[in-house]
Image (tube, rainbow, N blue to C red):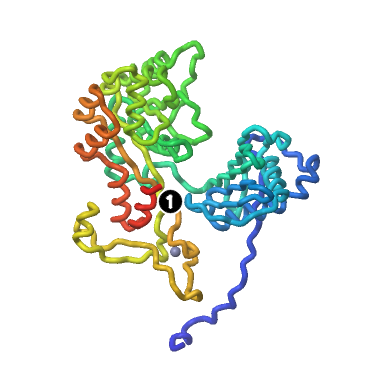
């Protein structure tokens, strides 16, 4: 090698030992008596550690153990994508499942009802939370372990990947009374988005009050209001307004009573809440149904935001290409976009170097795409008529609101993800 002279001799590549995960106790604060469960611990603890260590080393977000006949299937999810990770004999899977339940402070004797808990853990000097849930199925118990990296900051809309334009819009919206909702299916990050929007409010100008449990989240400048048990929701909101609250975080809207109470106060103060729903149009239709009529919704609602996760291209191995101008036009990207990125083509050579960062998968981490249904004058008119999902979508398009696809294309244009990934997400 010509330039070898200038280089220091590279040391022989050594195998790196991976320290196994440490389990630091259940999240519910219970003491786990390992001694009293000696046989279970002996049968399952090391295996459970190996399984979780392997998943953490692979950046997994979920581990699933599912008994099927004499075996159990293990699947890990990395950036939300499932990867089959082998089969275990049923007895071994049972031991692992029971040990993880024990470590999460759950009842190992009860295998007939769903249980959920969590384990504090540490891996490579970083804190993690393992949310453990067990669900009885025909062949035994299905165990799900959701892994959360405690150091990963998902606090602000910027952390979640929200565009600057949208962040400014939300900040402006929160400056006057009205109801702002976040919607999504459970487990898709709806509450994370809700709290991010709350952190987006200018706390130096506005007084922010929470009427709901903050679920252990740290929110500066948010005061929790003591709720009088004899007061109904509308009365509690009125009291918060008297104490000079400008923005109020309310409990999730789960039924007509809460919907009506929030809409009745939306003219007095800015209210932020969440609601389960497939997407903003279906949440809007549900809200109208709960309200009983369109008028209070048209008057009080400011908008409904939702999000969907998409994988980010690996920054170490993404490949640039120049799209054709007519193709850009066809998919709705501006002609100025000169370069797009995609994951590298798979090499036919089995000895070809594999990207160390993403292990050849081409993607690393995820971000969110947003959709925002805004209650414009046109939307108000629609709400007081007889809207359906199609007419709501048509109005969103007409008023040029941010749709999921647009926001996804923004990420493609910025080189953060690929068109292939965008297509995959919309096919699911
Ligand atoms: Zn890579």
Q: How many numbered discs sit on the rendered protein? A: 1
Q: Whole-percent x and y of residue 312?
A: 40, 55
Which secondary structure lies at badge 1?
strand
The quadrant where residue 143 appears: top right
Residue 42 seen by the camera: yes
Q: Whole-percent x and y of residue 26?
A: 65, 39
- Image point 22% across, 39% down: which residue? 397
Position of residue 9 relative to residue 60, above or below, is below
Pick whichever, 329 or 306, lies toward us.
329
- Image point 52% across, 81% down: which residue? 8
Relative placement, left or right, of 180 versus 118 is left
Q: Whole-percent x and y of residue 180?
A: 34, 29
Residue 198 seen by the camera: no
Position of residue 248 relative to residue 353, above or below, is above
Residues packed near mark 1 inside 10 Å, few (<14), some (14 to 19) or many (20 plus) = some
- Image point 50% across, 64% down: which residue? 359
The quadrant where residue 202 appears: top left
Pick whichever, 353 or 152, lies toward us.
353
Position of residue 196 relative to residue 366, above or below, is above
Quadrant location of ligand 1? bottom left
Pick whichever, 150 or 350, lies toward us.
350
Name the residue furthest top.
230
Reading the image, the residue beneath label 1 is 366
Relative placement, left or right, of 206 versus 323 is right
Q: Whole-percent x and y of residue 91?
A: 73, 49
């Amino acid at each position: 090698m010509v330039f070898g002279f200038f280089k220091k001799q590279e040391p022989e590549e050594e195998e790196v030992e991976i320290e196994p995960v440490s389990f630091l106790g259940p999240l519910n604060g219970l003491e786990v008596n390992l001694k009293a469960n000696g046989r279970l611990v002996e049968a399952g603890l090391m295996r459970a550690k190996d399984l979780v260590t392997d998943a953490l080393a692979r950046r997994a977000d979920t581990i699933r153990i599912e008994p099927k006949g004499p075996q159990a299937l293990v699947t890990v999810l990395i950036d939300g994508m499932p990867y089959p990770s082998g089969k275990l004999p049923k007895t071994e899977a049972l031991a692992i499942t029971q040990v993880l339940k024990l470590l999460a402070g759950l009842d190992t004797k009860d295998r007939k009802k769903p249980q959920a808990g969590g384990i504090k853990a540490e891996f490579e000097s970083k804190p993690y939370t393992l949310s453990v849930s067990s669900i009885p199925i025909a062949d035994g118990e299905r165990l799900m372990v959701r892994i959360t990296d405690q150091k990963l900051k998902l606090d602000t809309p910027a952390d979640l990947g929200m565009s600057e334009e949208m962040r400014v819009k939300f900040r402006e919206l929160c400056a006057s009374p009205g109801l702002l909702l976040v919607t999504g299916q459970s487990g898709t990050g709806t509450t994370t988005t809700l709290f991010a929007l709350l952190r987006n409010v200018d706390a130096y100008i506005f007084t922010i009050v929470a009427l709901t449990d903050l679920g252990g989240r740290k929110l500066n400048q948010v005061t929790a209001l003591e709720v009088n048990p004899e007061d109904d929701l509308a009365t509690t909101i009125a009291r918060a307004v008297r104490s000079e609250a400008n923005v109020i975080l309310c409990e999730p809207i789960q039924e007509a009573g809460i919907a009506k109470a929030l809409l009745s106060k939306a003219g007095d103060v800015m209210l932020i809440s969440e609601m389960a729903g497939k997407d903003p149009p279906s949440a809007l239709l549900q809200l109208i149904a709960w309200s009983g009529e369109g008028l209070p919704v048209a008057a009080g609602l400011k908008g409904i935001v939702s999000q969907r996760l998409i994988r980010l291209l690996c920054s170490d191995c993404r490949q640039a290409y120049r799209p054709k101008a007519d193709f850009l036009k066809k998919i709705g990207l501006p002609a100025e976009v000169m370069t797009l990125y995609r994951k590298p083509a798979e090499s036919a050579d089995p000895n070809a170097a594999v990207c160390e960062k993403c292990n050849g998968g081409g993607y690393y981490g995820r971000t969110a795409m947003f959709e925002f249904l805004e209650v414009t004058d046109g939307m108000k008119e629609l709400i007081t008529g007889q809207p359906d999902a199609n007419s709501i979508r048509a109005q969103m398009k007409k008023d040029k609101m941010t749709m999921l696809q647009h926001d996804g294309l923004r990420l493609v244009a910025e080189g953060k993800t690929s068109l292939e990934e965008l297509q995959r997400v919309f096919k699911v």
